[in-house]
Image (spheres, helix red, strand yellow):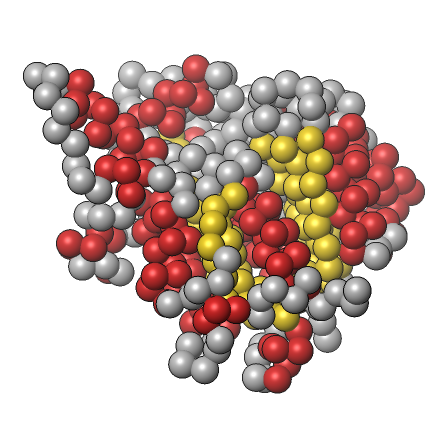
Amino acid sequence: MQLKRVVVTGLGALTPIGNNIEEYWEGLVSGKSGSAPVTYYDAEKFKTKFACELKNFKAEDYFDRKEARKLDRFAQYALVSSDEAILDSKLDLNVVDKFRVGVIWGAGIGGLETFQNEVINFANGDGTPRFNPFFIPKMIADIAPGNISIKHGFMGPNYTTVSACASSANAMIDALNYIRLGHCDVIVTGGSEAAVTMAGMGGFNAMHALSTRNDSPETASRPFDATRDGFVLGEGAGALVLEEYEHAKARGAKIYAEVLGGGMTSDAYHMTAPHPDGIGVVQVMKNCLENAGLKPEDVDAINTHGTATVLGDVAELKAISEVFGDHAPKININSTKSMTGHLLGAAGAIEAISSILSMKYGIVPPTINHTTFDDRIDPKLNLTLNKAQKREVNVAMSNTFGFGGHNACVVFKKIS
């Protein structure tokens, strides 16, 4: 069977360093940190008092009050970013066959704030079960793609992938496969998350997963640095319109990049820790390259998972050295989480967007906040430290891993 080609024709982003694609890219290239003290709740008693929240986002700018009350923040973010991507794609919704347009979305947690608040309200009451009638539909992770499809009338495949921090990367891979197998013409994909809540922060603190650099939140996310002490929690969304190549070409669509392939593996090792030898990570990149029909020396840039955890960064870079061998030092390796923080289920989407824009503009965003080299990391690797680097990027890879041992890898190619 001849697989169909799949391309990216629309992008949308809502991030801690920019509320649309243009702002997001400017933030990335300039090395902007999105980390700051928490404003959503009183964090005084929490071990970590900062996060990468959205800035200047007001639900009333996008939704009327009645509609906003029916949507958890993660679903609001999904609708805003997907609207930008659909508008960017210039799809004619009056012409497209909506039975062949799907929405496959990623969310690692979903409506955590809604769940938290409803349980607190019940616990503070007299035991009578008084719950908001929108409690369940606001909370469930699959409501984000559901709302996107309802708004635009998309009647193709519609569901959410949940694989912790790999969720939106898995969503993109599923979308890729649906289109290249001929089941759909267009799929809106990506992911959203809104876990900057008391429950989210408290839970990750209990796991000792978060940085506690409260005296300098703007420098707390420091992937690959010897002094890293955990990730910084972020929020937001990223959206991509994936489209069958001939379908896009026939309507004269702008094409950002071709989606060449994806890979998935499991560490089968630990609930939260990566395999120390990066076995699953090695295999997921090999699977991705094979799926895309590429050789290791074809890759120009890798946006790593790079969360700034003590174990994870070392294991991933060891895996890159193993897979790419002598070519590894020629690759621009970076972690945009140094700027955006970790968006959990939305991480794969916004990082894939960064990879795509690197190909478009010939610039690789930096890994900021690096001050001290880790002697466990190969010094020959180009980690794109502290300053963006100009270079031609024809093939870009994006790695995303999640609690539970989920590994996902997606690779894109520039179309001239």
Which residue occupies 64% across, 28% down?
405
- Across and down, in percent, residue 266 comes to 69, 31
Q: Is residue 404 above or below residue 192?
A: above
Does residue 44 appear anywhere in the picture?
Answer: yes
Q: Is residue 261 above or below residue 122?
A: below
Residue 205 placement: quadrant: top left
The quarter in which the N terminus is drawn is: bottom right
Q: Residue furthest left?
A: 126
- Across and down, in percent, residue 137 comes to 29, 43
The quarter in which the C terminus is drawn is: bottom right
Q: Residue 283 vs residue 126: left or right?
A: right
Does residue 391 appear anywhere in the picture?
Answer: no
Most foreground residue, 100 or 195: 100
- Across and down, in percent, residue 152 comes to 37, 67
Q: Residue 50 vs residue 219: left or right?
A: left
Which residue occupies 68% across, 62% down?
181
Q: Is residue 219 above or below residue 66?
A: above
Q: Is residue 28 above or below residue 129?
A: below
- Across and down, in percent, residue 258 comes to 69, 65
Which residue occupies 89% across, 40% down?
325
Q: Residue furthest right?
A: 326
Most foreground residue, 195 or 377: 195
Most foreground residue, 275 or 265: 265
Q: Residue 285 vs residue 401: left or right?
A: right
